[in-house]
Image (cartoon, grey):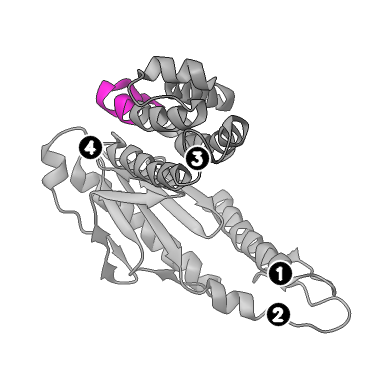
Amino acid sequence: MEAFPLDVTGRYKLLSLAVVPTVGPLQPFCNKTGSEILTLFKGCTMAQVVSTLKQSTWNLWRAHTHTKHFSSHTKAIAFADDLAILTYGETTAEAEAYTNSELAKIEKWAKQNKMQFNELKSQTMLIGRKKKSHRENIKIYLNNRRLEQVKEMKYLGIYFDNRLNFHKHIEHTTEKSKKIIYMLGRIAKLNWGLGHISLKTIYKGALVPLMTYGAPVWEEAIKKQRLLRKMQSFQRLINIKIAKAYRTISYEASCLLAGVQPIGIEIEGKTCLYK
């Protein structure tokens, strides 16, 4: 399977056309068929203009995908101004052929709607379980330029790798969380500084969302004990701060004294809530 995110280069140029601080309603933003996409009125903020136009851009895209479907081997995922294309093939050559065919459709649609995807910021990744597939080079083209092939990519805040084991994502989130804990450590000592309630509020409001972000996607990865222990090691650090305990206590005891759930249960709960 191949996956690649695409970046829109013309979005800021498109947005600048709508910034017209005049009285009365602005002219509707229409596509080539003349159907109305949006109407902007006076008094709207710049943030509203940007948000509405981004929504309109992807309204156009959704209309395209509904009227000109991709093949059964392809799925398109769009969020805000990020677009990901997933293509499946029995062989690498087949996946490559499907991908280039679908990208040709996307290029055609972009030209019709006076947009352009940035090939320099777009990447492609070959996903497969076999070790041999990770060494294969694929030739995927956008705007007549070959896209960069990578072994891992970040999409919507989650790091995907070519084996979907999510090692990079878990390592990144734990390191980021540890930096926050070390900063808190300067103002949360054993006998002075932030108290139990304040630290627990920060933990639940900032660290838990950070560590469980996108959990339904990578939840299977923490079934590997090495990755689970990495997350438990991070949680033990903040538990000691919350409980004002000594560094020698075990992970299980730190959860009990801090009054928090083990991180594995937190992730499982987020996943069950999503499902």
Q: Position of residue 6 (x, y in %)?
A: 41, 60
Asked whether the beta carbons under mark 4 and mark 1 sit within 8 Å of each other, the answer is no
**Secondary structure under badge 2?**
loop
Q: Residue at x 58, y 24 (%)?
A: 273
Residue carrying label 2: 19
Could you tell me the amino acid type at mark 3? Ala
Measure how far apart labels 3 and 4 are at the Cα level: 46 Å
| Other residues around mark 3 within 10 Å, as few (<14) / some (14–19) / many (≥20) | many
Of label 4 and label 1, which has the lower sequence position? 1
Of label 2 and label 4, which has the lower sequence position? 2
Asked whether the beta carbons under mark 3 and mark 4 sit within 8 Å of each other, the answer is no
Asked whether the beta carbons under mark 1 and mark 2 sit within 8 Å of each other, the answer is yes
Measure how far apart labels 4 and 1 are at the Cα level: 42 Å
Measure how far apart labels 3 and 1 are at the Cα level: 43 Å
Q: Which residues are magenta?
A: 219-230
Of label 1 and label 2, which has the lower sequence position? 2
Q: What label does residue 49 carry, if any?
A: 1
Q: What label does residue 188 carry, if any?
A: 3
> Residue 149's image quarter?
bottom left
Is 273 drawn above or below residue 10 in the view shown?
above
Quadrant in the picture for the N terminus: top left
Measure how far apart labels 2 and 3 are at the Cα level: 47 Å
Residue carrying label 4: 128
